[in-house]
Amino acid sequence: MLSTIQYLLRVRIIVKQSTKQRLAIGLLLLMCIKAWVMPLLYLDYELRKEFIIDNYCVNKNRPELHCDGKCYLATRLAAVQEQEQKQAERNFVFKLLENVTDCRTFFANFSAPEYLTGDLAKTSFSYSPSSFDDAALSGVFHPPQLG
C-alpha cells in the first residue's frame, strides 16, 4: 500500500515538472517568434519572390524601377514596425500608470505618529511659533542683487 502511494506521488511530481517544462518551452517559443518576425519576413520574401512579384507588386507595370516585390516587403516591414511601436507605447503607458497607482511604495515605510497610536487624552500638545532662526534664513532668502 505504501509503495502505491509513493508511486502516485512520484507520478504527480513528474507530471507537475513536465507541465512546467511544457509551459516554459511554450513561452520560449513565443519569445523566439516575436524576436524572429523581421527575419521571417525577409525569408518569406526570398522564398516567395516570384509569387509576390506576380500578385502583390504595385510596380509590376513599370519594370524599369526594378522593384521586384520590394514595395510589398517594405509595406509589411513598416506594418510590423508600427505594430511593435504601438505595443511599446502601450507597455510604457501601462508601466507608467502602474507606478503611479502603486500605493505600496508610498505606504511601505509609513508608520503612524505616536499621537495616533496612543490615547489622545494622555497626549499633550504644544505649539511653538517658529522653530527656525530668522537670522539664519535671511542669508538665504533675499531678493537677487543687481550689479
Image: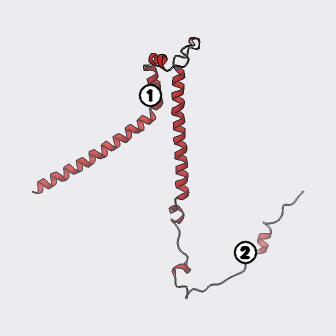
Circles 2 and 1 in contact, beta carbons < 8 Å: no
Q: Quadrant of residue 115?
A: bottom right
Instruction: Check disc 1: other Cα within 10 Å, few if <14, some if 14-19, many if 20+.
Output: few
Q: Looking at this view, is 42 or 58 the one in front? A: 58
Classify mark 1: helix, strand or loop. helix
Q: Position of residue 94 (x, y in %)?
A: 52, 50
In front of the other: 98 or 136: 98
Q: Which mark, by number, is residue 132?
A: 2
Q: Residue furthest top?
A: 64
The disc labelled 1 sits on which kind of residue?
A: Leu
Give the vertical position of 130 relative to 4 (above or below). below
Picture quarter containing residue 75? Answer: top right
Say whether residue 124 is left or right of residue 9: right
Image quarter of the N terminus: bottom left
Instruction: Work out whether 141 lies above or below 89.
Output: below
| Image coordinates for residue 144, horizontal then vertical, percent | 84, 61
Residue 48, position as x, y percentages in the image: 43, 19
- Residue picked out by circle 1: 40
Q: Left or right: 56 with respect to 147?
A: left
**Residue at image point 82% right, 65% down:** 142
Q: Amino acid at mark 2?
A: Phe
Q: Extreme left residue here?
A: 1
- Choose the circle earlier in sequence order: 2 or 1: 1
At 53% from the left and 58% from the top, the residue drawn is 101
